[in-house]
Amino acid sequence: EPEVTQTPSHQVTQMGQEVILRCVPISNHLYFYWYRQILGQKVEFLVSFYNNEISEKSEIFDDQFSVERPDGSNFTLKIRSTKLEDSAMYFCASRGSGLAVATQYFGPGTRLTVL
Amino acid sequence: AQKVTQAQTEISVVEKEDVTLDCVYETRDTTYYLFWYKQPPSGELVFLIRRNSFDEQNEISGRYSWNFQKSTSSFNFTITASQVVDSAVYFCALSETNFGNEKLTFGTGTRLTIIP
């Protein structure tokens, strides 16, 4: 069964460093998302992406964040200058097109630890 | 703005008991989707079910059943004859139809512990 994959599973970085989180969505999906879950809290929407551009972004998704689909398979989230409060689990999700396929399928997540 | 409330923060039941997880939602849209996701201790988010706002039929899948009531804006989830493997955090989520987006708004989750 097709699944969303994410790398790395765990990333440790120093405050102020740049990190890139990588995702490979399900191959025939067209809509891509990033969500964040701070430890013990709920899952929060960061950004949605379709047709090579951002569809919507939350207040959390400020100028230090960016997303890119550099090729036909990868979808990346870049955090330019990490802060302590960026420590969280980051989930990538994807879905197919049309209302009949509205379900978002999530990857296993990348746990980001900022020291 | 859309909102999902899961008032039960933690629930513990003894194995084989039935348990119901509550979910109440708010939305101004007439067309929307409701979801339940399971997050086991390993951390991934596992899709369980999706309902659209026009389909109020209850659904049963094995030991799982869902009760969707638009009149009370609720989408509750029942596990029958619970098992230890059901121990997880369960999230209810809502998406409004916004072509190209359909972002999910999650509740705060209910941590379910099944005691052997």
Image (cartoon, rainbow, N blue to C red):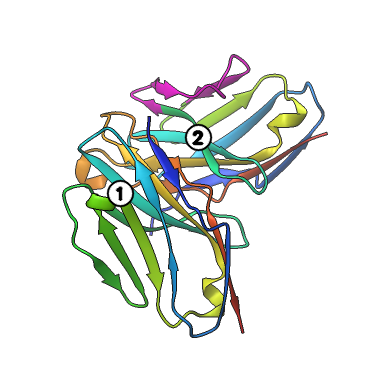
Report the front residue among B51 and A15: B51
Chain of the residue where label 1 is placed in the rendered structure: B
Q: Is residue B43 magenta?
A: no
* Quarter of the image where the C terminus of chain A is located: top right
The image quarter containing residue B112 is bottom right
* Quarter of the image where the N terminus of chain A is located: bottom left
Q: Is residue B27 left or right of residue B42?
A: left
Q: Residue at x 50, y 40 (%)?
A: A92
Q: Is residue A58 magenta?
A: yes
Q: Amino acid at mark 1?
A: Ser
Q: Which residue is mark 2?
A: A34
Image position of B61 with respect to A43: above or below: below
Q: Residue at x 57, y 36 (%)?
A: A22
Q: Nearer the viewer, mark 1 or mark 2?
A: 1
Q: Residue at x 59, y 14 (%)?
A: A63
In the image, which disc is placed on residue B73?
1
Report the front residue among A84 and A3: A84
Q: Residues within 10 Å of mark 1 (few under 14, many from 20)?
A: some
Please state the extent of the stretch shown in magenta in the rendering: A49-68
Residue B44 x %, y % = 55, 55
Q: Residue at x 34, y 30 (%)?
A: B101
Q: Is residue B77 left or right of residue A58?
A: left
Report the front residue among A59 and B70: B70
Residue A39 x %, y % = 67, 46
Q: Amino acid at mark 2?
A: Trp
Query: Which element is circle 1 on?
Result: loop
In the image, which disc is placed on residue B97?
none
Q: Are both tags, 1 and 2, on one chain?
A: no
Image position of B64 with respect to A61: above or below: below
Residue B7 x %, y % = 50, 53
